[in-house]
Image (cartoon, rainbow, N blue to C red):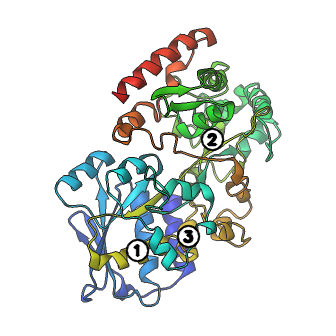
Amino acid sequence: MKKFKKLLSLSLGAIMAFSLAACKLKKNDGGEDFGNDSSDSPRITVAASADPIEQEIVKTFIRAYLAQPGNENKKFSVQQIGDPYDSWMQRQMYADKLPDIVQMYDYKAEYWTNENLLVPISDYMKRDGISENNYFSAVIEMAKSKSGSDDMYWAPRDYNKVVCVYNTKMFEIAGVKEPEDGWTFEDFEKTCAALKAKEEVLKTYSGGKSVWAANINIDWAAVYYPIMKSFGGELIDTENATAFKNETAVKKAIDFLCDYVDKGYAVSTIDTMDTGSVFGNKQCAMWFTVRPNVPDVYDNVDGNLNFVSFPTLTGVETSYVGMGCSGYGMTTACSDEKRELAWDFLKFVMSEEGQETFCAAGGGIPMIKSLAEKSDAAFRTVYPNLNNDVFVENAERDLPMTYMKGFLPEKQLGIYNTILNNMCSSFYKFTPAERSERLMLVKGYIEKTFN
C-alpha cells in the first residue's frame, strides 16, 4: 500500500501540474470536498469504497479532472461507501440519499442496475462520438449490466485479467527455470513439482515459514469459473434455474484445481486463513492475481517479481482467463442540472488522460485498446523492465465475471454471497469419488438460495 500511495503522488506530478488554489480540499462529514468553493457550479457527490486505496483512486481521478482546462471552477465531494456495500446502498436508496455517482463492481452490477440505480450512458457516448470499439470488449460487456438491454450503464475504470505473478528470487534460489508466456497447465504443474522439491531451501528464504509453489487463489471465482467454463461447465444453469450446468465438467474443474492443494503445491484456507498474504510474505513462488494487487506486494518481495500469462488448458476449445473491472455510474438520483457535469467526469474516467492518470499509479491497466498498445503508456513505465504486455494480450481468452447475467436478478446478491469466494473450499482434501457426493450437497445448498 505504501508503494501504491507513493506512486499516486508521483504520477500526478509527472503527468500534469495544477494550481492548489483551484483544487481546495476539506473534510466534510467523513468525506472530502474538492474544487472552487466560491463557484456557482453544482457540486457532484461521488461515493466510493471506504478502502483507502479505492478512496485515493477516486480522488486521483477528481484532482486530474479538475486540472483539465475549463474545469477549475467545478466542485466535487467524495463519500465513503460503508461496509457492506449492498446494505449501504439499500439504506441510501430507502432514505433518498443516493450520491450523484457511485462506484460499481463487476459481480454486483447487474443486481443494482436492475434495481434502477443507474442512468444509462450509451446515449451520452454516441452523442459525444465515443465508440464502444475503442475499448476491450470484455470491459464493455461488464458495463452492459441490465438484463435484456444493450446499453452501457456505468463507466468502466480498468481492465483486470488474471495473470501469474512470480517471485524471481525464489526461482533463482530453487534453480528452477522461470515460466514463459504461452505455457500450459502441464508446464505449470511441472514447475510446481520442481519448486516443491526445493521446499527446504525455500523455507530458509521465507525465514523458516511454510512455503508453497503457488497461491492459485482456488476459492476465487475469477480462477475457478474460467476453468469450469473451459471444460464446458457453468456455475448456474440459467435455463433450468439450477446450480451447475454440465455437472461432469463442473466436477472436472473442481478435481483439477483441488489436485494442486492435495499435492501440496498450492496454499488453501486449510493451510492459512489469509492466502492473500503468502506471496507478500515470501511463502509462495507464484500467485494467480490481477494488476491492482501488485503495488501492495512489490516492496515486500524487494521488487523480485515478474509477470507471465495465466496457463492454458490443452484439449479444450477455448482456455478462458478470468476478467473483471470496477467503475463509476451516474445514479438516478442525480438531478437534471447535474447530469451533464456527472457525465463529463465519467467521460474523463474513460478517456486517455484519465486512464493514464490512473495507470501511472502502478495498479491499473488501460481499457482503451489503442492506449494498451502504446510502448510508452503509463502502465508500462511504473515497472519498465517487467513483462507488462501480459496484462493486455490474448483478449480472446477473456471471460468477464457475468456468470449469472439474466438469472433471477432479485436473488443475485444472496447467490453471490453463497458461492463467490468460498465454493471450492467445500472440496479440499476429499477424494474425487467423495467430491461427487459433496457436489450434490453444495448444489442443493446453492439452490436453496434461489428460493
Classify residue 93 as left or right of residue 416: left
> Between tags 1 and 2, which lies in front?
1
Q: For the residue marked with disc 2, what is the amino acid?
A: Phe
Q: Which image quadrant for residue 62?
A: bottom left
Q: Which image quadrant for residue 123?
A: bottom left
> Between tags 3 and 1, which lies in front?
1
Q: Which residue is mark 3?
A: 355
The answer to whether one can see residue 196 in this image is: yes
Q: Residue 276: which numbered mark, if any?
A: none
Q: Residue 288: which numbered mark, if any?
A: 2
Q: Which residue is mark 1?
A: 343
Bin the neighbour count of mark 1 within 10 Å (Cα to Cα): few under 14, some 14-19, many 20 and up. Answer: many
Note whether 175 is above or below 432 in the view shown: below
Bin the neighbour count of mark 3 within 10 Å (Cα to Cα): few under 14, some 14-19, many 20 and up. Answer: many
Note whether 335 is above or below 203 in the view shown: below
> What residue appears at the point 36 percent right and 64 percent down from the top-left corner?
119
Of the image marks 2 and 3, the number of the one nearer the N terminus: 2
Give the total of numbered labels: 3
Question: What is the x, y in percent for residue 333?
Answer: 26, 65
Of the image marks 1 and 2, the number of the one nearer the N terminus: 2
Question: What is the x, y in percent for residue 400?
Answer: 57, 48
Of the image marks 3 and 1, the number of the one nearer the N terminus: 1
> Between tags 2 and 3, which lies in front?
3
Q: CA distance from mark 3 to mark 1?
A: 16 Å
Q: Quadrant of the C terminus?
A: top left
